[in-house]
C-alpha cells in the first residue's frame, strides 16, 4: 500500500507553528476524505485537535488547486481531479505544554502524532513516512520511530497507529545512550540549561531499565527513547518504543524531586509491557474519533504506578523509608479523599473521560483516582497472593503470566485478567474483586501489614499541655494576600457550615484574616468553638457560623514494626527485593 509522506518544517517556530505538507495517495478515487484524531491514546479526553489546523489547501501534481470541503469537525473532503497523488498543506498551532499536545517555540518543538497528522479516513492500513526539515540552528530530531536508512531526519511508521504512538522532539537536546544486550536506549534531555544533571539521570535510568528487564524477562522493542522535556511542566505519557516526560530543571537538585522524576520514568517504562502490549481489550485498535471506555485502567495505571515506585527501590535508587513514603502517599491520598465512598475504581476508570480528565472543585467529594486506588489495590493484591501461596507466588508472577497470555493483538477482558490472577494465587480472589474493585467500602490493610511486619505510625501524642488545634477543613489558597477557598470537602466543618469554593474569607469573628493567616488564627480557637466567618462571595459580604472541629490525625504513614518477627521480616525482604519468600 502506498504511504502517506509528510514533511514537517518550522519556518517561524517562534510563532508556534509547524508547517505540514503531505503527499497523499488517492487510489484513483475522485474524492478522498482526510481525518484528524480528536484524542491521544493514554490520555483519556476528547481534545479537538482540529481546532489548531489552519489554512488547509490541496493541489494536484501540476500545482493546480483542488476543491477542499470540511465534512465534519475533524474531516476534510478533497476532490482529486483524478490525480493519483495529491499535495495537502496546512499549518498547526502548537502552544500547549503537555505530554500529549504540540509545543513549538524558537528553540525546539514537541510534535505529537494525534494533533499533527491528517490521515486518510478510509482506514486502510498503510505506512506513514515523516521527514523533518530542521531550522538552521537546531541540531536533530529524536523519536521512537525507526529512521529510514541512508537518510537524515526521515522516519517510517508502518501504520498510522505507530505514527500516533511516536512523538517527535526536534531541537538541540542533550542525548545520552546506553546499550543493553545490543539494544540501544536513549535519554534525551531538552532544556538542561546547565542545571539538570543529565549524566546522573542517564546512569540511574539505565539501572531502572535493567530492573524492569529483570522483572519482565523480555525486551519487546528494538530501541527505546526517554524524551525528557525540562520545561517546568509535569507528567508523562507512555508509548511502545518511547515515552515523553516533563519535569523541572531543578529536579536533580533535591532528593525528593529527583526520586519523583525517577519514579515517573519508571512508571512510564513499565507501560512498555503493562498498557502498551498487555492491555484491556477496549484499548485498541483505537477509534481516534471517539472515546474508548474500559473499566480496567486500575490495571493499566494503578498496577503500573505501584511497580513504578517498587522497581525504583529494587534498582537500589530509593531507601526502604523512601519507598514506604511513596506508598504511604498513595494510601493517605486514598484514605483522605471522600470520593472513595462514592465511586468504585472500576467506575473511575470507565468515566475517566468525563471525570478524571475534567476535574473540578467537587471532584474529591465524588471521585477517586484509578491511579491512586489502583496502586493501593495492587499492593494489597500482591500481599494477598504472597499470603495465600505461603510466599511462593507474587503479583509479579501474575503480571508475567498475564503478559505471556494476553500481550497479543486482542487484549484481555476483565474476567480473563482476574482468571490469571486466580491461577497464580491458586485460589479465588472474589471478595477482593467485589469489594476492592467494584465496591466503595473501606479497604482493610491489617492482614497485608501483618504479613510484612509493617504498621501505620502511631499518631504522636500532643506535646506537653498544648491543646489540639481547631480545624475548619477548607482547602484554601493565598491569592495575592486574599484568603480564598479552593475546595470544600465533605465531612469537614467548612462543608457543614456552607462555605463555598471561591469564597474569600475576609474575617473570623470581628478580625481580618489575610491570605497567610488562617493557620495562626485557628490556633486562637479550640475544637468545638463557634466562629463567625465573614466571606465575600461574588463581592457580597455574607456571615457563616462555623463550628470548628479537630484535624484528623495523620494515620496513614507506613513504618516497619519494631516488633516484627523473623518470618515477617523475611516476607518484607522478599517483597522489597522482588523474589518469592520460599
Ligand atoms: Zn501511566
Image: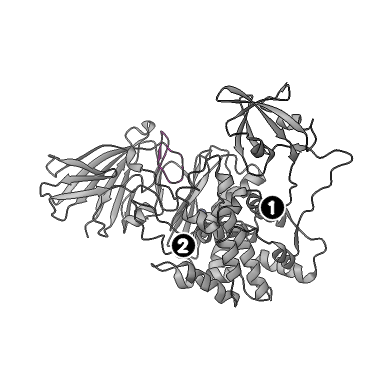
- Circle nearer the N terminus (2, 1): 2
Q: Secondary structure at mark 2?
A: strand
Q: Residue at x 14, y 52 (%)?
A: 84
Of 246 and 420, which appears nearest the observer? 420
Would the CB of label 2 be found within 8 Å of ligand 1?
A: no
Of 550 and 568, which appears nearest the observer? 550
Q: Position of residue 554 (x, y in %)?
A: 74, 48
CA gap between label 2 and label 1 equals 34 Å
Query: Which secondary structure type mostly characterizes the magenta part of the structure?
Result: loop
Instruction: Give the quadrant of residue 344.
Output: bottom right
For disc 1, the marked residue is 325
**Looking at the picture, does residue 452 appear above or below residue 317?**
below
**Looking at the picture, does residue 156 appear above or below residue 433?**
above
Of 364 and 528, which appears nearest the observer? 528
Q: Position of residue 310 (x, y in %)?
A: 62, 59
For disc 2, the marked residue is 183
Amino acid at each position: 500500500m502506498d504511504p502517506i509522506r509528510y514533511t514537517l518544517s518550522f519556518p517561524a517556530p517562534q510563532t508556534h507553528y509547524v508547517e505540514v505538507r503531505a503527499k497523499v495517495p488517492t487510489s484513483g478515487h475522485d474524492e478522498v476524505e482526510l481525518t484528524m484524531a480528536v484524542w491521544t491514546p493514554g490520555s483519556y479526553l476528547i481534545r479537538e485537535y482540529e481546532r489548531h489546523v489552519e489554512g488547509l489547501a490541496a493541489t494536484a501534481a501540476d500545482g493546480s488547486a483542488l476543491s477542499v470541503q470540511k465534512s465534519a469537525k475533524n474531516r476534510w473532503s478533497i476532490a482529486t481531479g483524478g490525480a493519483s497523488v495529491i499535495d495537502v498543506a496546512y499549518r498547526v498551532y502548537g502552544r500547549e505544554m503537555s505530554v500529549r499536545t504540540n509545543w513549538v517555540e524558537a528553540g525546539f518543538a514537541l510534535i505529537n502524532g494525534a494533533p499533527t497528522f491528517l490521515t486518510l479516513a478510509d482506514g486502510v492500513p498503510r505506512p506513514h513516512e515523516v521527514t523533518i526539515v530542521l531550522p538552521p540552528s537546531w541540531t536533530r530530531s529524536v523519536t521512537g520511530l525507526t529512521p529510514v536508512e541512508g537518510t537524515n531526519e526521515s522516519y517510517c511508521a508502518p501504520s498510522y497507529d505507530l505514527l500516533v504512538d511516536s512523538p517527535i522532539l526536534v531541537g538541540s537536546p542533550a542525548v545520552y545512550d546506553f546499550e543493553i544486550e545490543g539494544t540501544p536506549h536513549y535519554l534525551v534531555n531538552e532544556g538542561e540549561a546547565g542545571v539538570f544533571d543529565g549524566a546522573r539521570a542517564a546512569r540511574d535510568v539505565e539501572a531502572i531499565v535493567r530492573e524492569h528487564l529483570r522483572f519482565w524477562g523480555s525486551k519487546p522493542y528494538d530501541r527505546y527513547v526517554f524524551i525528557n522535556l525540562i520545561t517546568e511542566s509535569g507528567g508523562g505519557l507512555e508509548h511502545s518504543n518511547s515515552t515523553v516526560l516533563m519535569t523541572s530543571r531543578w529536579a536533580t537538585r533535591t532528593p525528593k524531586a529527583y526520586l519523583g522524576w525517577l519514579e515517573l520514568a519508571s512508571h512510564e517504562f513499565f507501560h512498555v509491557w503493562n498498557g502498551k502490549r498487555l492491555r484491556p481489550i477496549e484499548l485498541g485498535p483505537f477509534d481516534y474519533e471517539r472515546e474508548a471506555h474500559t473499566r480496567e485502567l486500575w490495571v493499566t495505571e494503578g498496577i503500573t504506578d505501584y511497580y513504578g515506585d517498587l522497581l525504583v527501590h529494587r534498582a537500589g535508587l530509593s531507601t526502604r523509608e523512601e519507598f514506604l513514603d511513596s506508598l504511604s502517599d498513595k494510601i493517605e491520598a486514598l484514605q483522605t479523599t471522600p470520593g472513595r465512598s462514592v465511586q468504585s475504581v472500576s467506575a473511575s476508570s470507565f468515566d475517566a473521560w468525563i471525570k478524571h480528565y475534567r476535574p473540578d472543585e467537587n471532584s474529591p467529594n465524588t471521585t477517586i483516582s484509578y491511579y491512586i486506588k489502583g496502586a493501593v489495590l495492587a499492593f494489597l493484591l500482591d500481599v494477598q497472593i504472597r499470603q495465600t501461596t505461603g510466599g511462593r507466588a507474587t503479583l509479579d508472577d501474575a503480571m508475567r503470566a498475564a503478559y505471556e497470555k494476553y500481550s497479543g493483538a486482542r487484549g484481555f477482558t476483565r474476567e480473563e485478567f482476574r482468571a490469571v490472577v486466580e491461577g497464580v494465587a491458586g485460589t479465588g480472589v472474589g471478595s477482593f474483586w467485589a469489594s476492592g474493585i467494584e465496591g466503595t467500602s473501606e479497604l482493610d490493610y491489617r492482614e497485608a501489614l501483618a504479613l510484612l511486619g509493617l504498621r501505620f505510625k502511631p499518631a504522636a501524642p500532643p506535646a506537653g499541655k498544648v491543646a489540639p488545634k481547631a480545624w475548619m477543613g477548607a482547602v484554601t489558597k493565598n491569592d495575592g494576600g486574599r484568603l480564598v477557598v479552593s475546595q470544600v470537602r465533605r465531612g469537614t466543618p467548612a462543608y457543614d457550615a456552607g462555605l463555598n469554593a471561591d469564597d474569600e474569607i475576609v474575617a473570623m469573628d470581628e478580625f481580618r484574616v489575610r491570605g497567610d493567616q488562617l493557620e495562626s488564627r485557628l490556633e486562637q480557637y479550640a475544637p468545638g468553638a463557634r466562629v463567625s466567618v465573614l466571606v465575600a462571595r461574588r463581592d457580597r459580604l455574607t456571615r457563616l457560623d462555623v463550628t470548628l472541629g479537630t484535624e484528623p490525625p495523620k494515620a496513614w504513614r507506613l513504618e516497619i514494626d519494631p516488633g516484627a518477627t523473623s518470618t515477617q521480616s523475611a516476607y518484607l525482604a522478599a517483597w522489597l527485593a522482588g523474589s518469592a519468600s520460599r
